């Protein structure tokens, strides 16, 4: 190879993928036209976006695969604690809320009716909540500080269960095992939870169940205070008869 040819090859540009002719476009400066590689065009090209998305997905999957064993090591296998269910009654449920049954038409409002609080703080939401089967186990418990909540099951086939604890209004002061009570609730009644009552459920054995629910429209967005027994203590609770 001659020195001239070597010099020419040295200064001949190589069109790498980022400088393909399809990504070369004219740059207008005054009256002249000069061809240039536009890095902005390259960066905004669909293939470039796809490569970045694939790289980001791969990185996220790799990070998750590394974190998952660490989480399993941190929390370990769950220890299951059984809670024996008791039949609900007005007296036994009073520390947590009210048990509301049928009343005759025309009866005037009194203390036996659901004493609702907090519904004026936002938009009340009364709806039928369809839940898939959850069995009788749970690993977290929740309270709502701003509003009372009413729950009742529409299906008469079998009872449902609700685990509750007295209000503490603090996730740091979450219920201990000895603070939890599991209630068996029949069809034909509903419960009103006091503001702040800790609760897990509804729990049931059917493939699915419909519950009427009265709370605020944004309760589950801004007033959903939860303690995770599974993550924090490696505990799983099971309600048994």
Image: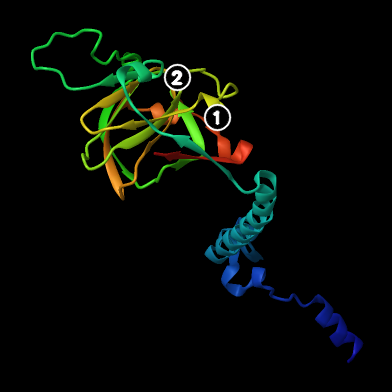
Badge 2 local density, few (<14 within 10 Å), some, or many (20+)? many
For this orientation, the residue located farthest to the bottom is 1
Badge 1 local density, few (<14 within 10 Å), some, or many (20+)? few
Horizontal relation, residue 116 to residue 38: left or right: left
**Which mark identifies residue 196?**
2
Q: Nearer the viewer, mark 1 or mark 2?
A: 1
Coordinates of residue 98 in the picture (x, y in percent): 32, 18
Callout 1–callout 2 Cβ contact below 8 Å = no
Whether residue 31 can be seen here: no
Question: Would you identify the image quadrant in which residue 38 lies?
Answer: bottom right
Whether residue 91 can be seen here: yes
Horizontal relation, residue 34 to residue 148: left or right: right
236 is higher (above) or lower (below) than 91: below
Question: Would you identify the image quadrant in which residue 104 lies?
Answer: top left
**Which mark identifies residue 177?**
1
Q: Residue at x 62, y 73 (%)?
A: 20
Q: Residue at x 24, y 12 (%)?
A: 112
| Numbered-mark total | 2
Between residue 213 and residue 192, name the one nearer to us: 192
Q: Residue at x 62, y 49 (%)?
A: 77
For this orientation, the residue located farthest to the right is 3
Horizontal relation, residue 70 to residue 7: left or right: left
Horizontal relation, residue 181 to residue 210: left or right: right
Q: Residue at x 62, y 37 (%)?
A: 233
Coordinates of residue 108 in the picture (x, y in percent): 14, 8
- SS under mark 1: helix
- SS under mark 2: loop
Colouring: rainbow
Q: Give the mark nearest the N terminus, 1 or 2.
A: 1
Coordinates of residue 71 in the picture (x, y in percent): 66, 48
Coordinates of residue 61 in the picture (x, y in percent): 61, 58
For this orientation, the residue located farthest to the left is 106
């Amino acid at each position: 190879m001659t020195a001239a040819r070597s010099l020419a090859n040295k200064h001949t540009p190589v069109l790498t993928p980022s400088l393909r002719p399809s990504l070369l476009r004219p740059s207008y400066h005054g009256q002249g036209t000069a061809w240039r590689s536009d890095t902005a065009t390259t960066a905004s090209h669909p293939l470039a976006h796809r490569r970045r998305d694939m790289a980001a997905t791969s990185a996220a999957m790799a990070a998750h695969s590394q974190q998952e064993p660490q989480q399993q090591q941190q929390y370990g296998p769950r220890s299951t604690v059984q809670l024996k269910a008791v039949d609900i009654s007005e007296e036994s449920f009073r520390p947590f809320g009210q048990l509301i049954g049928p009343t005759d038409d025309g009866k005037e409002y009194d203390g036996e009716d659901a004493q609702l609080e907090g519904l004026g703080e936002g938009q009340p939401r009364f709806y039928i909540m369809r839940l898939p089967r959850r069995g009788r186990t749970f690993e977290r418990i929740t309270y709502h500080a701003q509003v009372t909540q009413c729950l009742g099951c529409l299906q008469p086939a079998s009872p449902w269960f609700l685990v509750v604890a007295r209000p503490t209004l603090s996730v740091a002061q979450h219920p201990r095992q000895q603070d939890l009570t599991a209630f068996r609730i029949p069809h034909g009644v509903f419960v009103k939870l006091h503001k702040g009552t800790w609760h897990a459920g509804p729990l049931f054995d059917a493939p699915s169940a419909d519950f009427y629910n009265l709370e605020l429209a944004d309760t589950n967005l801004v007033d959903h205070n939860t303690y995770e027994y599974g993550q924090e203590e490696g505990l799983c609770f099971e309600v048994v008869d």
